[in-house]
Image: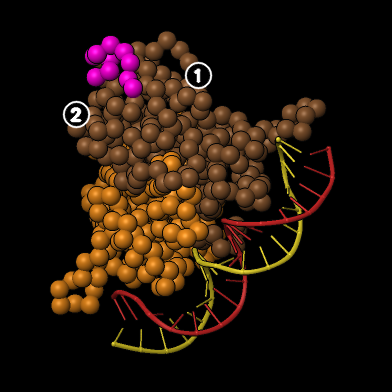
Chain colours: A orange, B brown, C yellow, D red
Amino acid sequence: MAKTKNYRHFCPVARSLEVIGEKWSLLVVRDLLRGPQRFTDLMKYLGGITPKWLTARLRELERAGIVERESVEGRREVRYTLTKKGRDLAPVVEALAVWGIEHAQRPPLPGEAIYPEQTLSAVTMSLNSHRHRLDEPATWLLSFGQSGTHILRYDGEHWSAQPGQAGADVTATITPEDWMRFLGARRLERAALLPTLHLEGEGDRIAEFERTFGIRRAGSSAD
Amino acid sequence: MAKTKNYRHFCPVARSLEVIGEKWSLLVVRDLLRGPQRFTDLMKYLGGITPKWLTARLRELERAGIVERESVEGRREVRYTLTKKGRDLAPVVEALAVWGIEHAQRPPLPGEAIYPEQTLSAVTMSLNSHRHRLDEPATWLLSFGQSGTHILRYDGEHWSAQPGQAGADVTATITPEDWMRFLGARRLERAALLPTLHLEGEGDRIAEFERTFGIRRAGSSAD
DNA sequence: CTGAATCCGACACGATACTG
DNA sequence: CAGTATCGTGTCGGATTCAG
């Protein structure tokens, strides 16, 4: 890494890119931002990386003080965690997610790795970044069948997402594939895909959900 | 580009990196964020890029709708400008600059390309990002000898920088090299480098300047 | 002097297989 | 589960050349 990806600029942007500009590096950080992960978890989320390169990236990130490697006592497991330096990369990942949602979306490709937690994390980043507000706190449950359930929550100020279940104001039941297709669509096409979400809840709470995802209203949407 | 830097994830972060994750791409955007530039301007600021790769990156960024190429009527000059899609990358560059200032700084290497405008742009990003405030608006003049003069301005809310001269509250006269060394130093070492700045102005305005650059006070500094 | 194109070598990376 | 090893390909740097 130090060889070719060396800009020799006295510029913090160039310096940052020298550290985390290699292929896969920022995606490793993206996945570790959701919490500690094991080697095979990362392999799964990064779908397509070879073990050789994941090892290489993790070693580099470790040397750079971004990632910490913790061996679980007695077990063969290794947990990778972000240090503070690593967590401080959150704004970078967030900015990339926001830009990607606004300017680089496309429908999912056939056979593409599909992990709802990644998209939900991106959706919350975008909503927080655009300061999207509701009139009151809300809890939305997204049920992806055997791919698990996730909660998208607005606490009156910030948005957050986590795997799990809870009493929800709105429940969406949808396959991961259809969810991706919905997110990958532009506003006008989303209305047509709305039935695939099978929304349940009170009428005005459903309307909030739809507005948040850009149905029938411009501006302040997760696009 | 489309070959190896293709993640096949349905994730906006991965999508963004597919578009602007190649070497040099974001640095081209960094320099165009300060305004339109010609091919040779970019060559200069990117110190080290080969014309072949600058051409390649500009073509890719053009195809991606991030950069626009404008031929100046009658002349051979070509001006490269950012589109809205390109300007929307500002938060990404900003986040990288902030992280780089906080976690990847180092003193300038000998023979390293030195362009004060790049560092000033990064400094304003960092100050704005940390919401660094002064009690009143301020205009600071940085005179780099034959490398030109630059103005760092606080309008009571935001920080900005531009090349040029103006009546200033504080004037610093310093070589670009010493300025880089100052910025590359950690807080404790900066105090020692302070004399190289040759600050002029009223006592309390100078104190503001010093506080902003982390002298004698922790927190809310450009570090 | 500006805005490129061309050839070549180094190494970053992908695909596949294998191991403690 | 958490990696190594081997081999082929693509990306990039360096030097040179070229047309307005």
> Residue A86: x and y, percent?
30, 52
Per the image, is B96 magenta? no
Q: Seen in the image, is A210 located left or right of residue B201? A: right
Q: Nearer the viewer, residue A56 or C17?
A: A56
Q: Residue at x 38, y 33 (%)?
A: B178
Location of the C terminus of chain B by quadrant is top left
Chain for disc number 2: B
Q: Is residue A140 visible?
A: no
Q: Are marks 2 and 1 on the same chain?
A: yes
> Residue A130: x and y, percent?
39, 34
Mark 2 highlights which residue?
B216
How packed is label 2: few (under 14 Cα within 10 Å), some, or many (20 or more)? few
Q: Circle 2 — which element?
A: loop
Q: Which residues are magenta?
A: B198-207
Structural distance between the alpha carbons of marks 2 and 1 = 29 Å
Which of the 4 image quarters holds residue A204?
A: top left
Q: Nearer the viewer, residue B173 or A157?
A: B173
When the figure is inspected, residue C3 is found, relative to residue B136, above or below; the finding is: below
Q: Circle 1 — which element?
A: loop
Give the amino acid type for the residue marked by disc 2 in the picture: Arg
Q: Residue at x 32, y 69 (%)?
A: A39
Q: Residue at x 29, y 59 (%)?
A: A67
Which disc number belongs to residue A136? Answer: none
> Residue A142: x and y, percent?
34, 52
Per the image, is B200 magenta? yes
Q: Residue at x 30, y 61 (%)?
A: A62
Give the amino acid type for the residue marked by disc 1 in the picture: Gly
Chain for disc number 1: B
Mark 1 highlights which residue?
B164
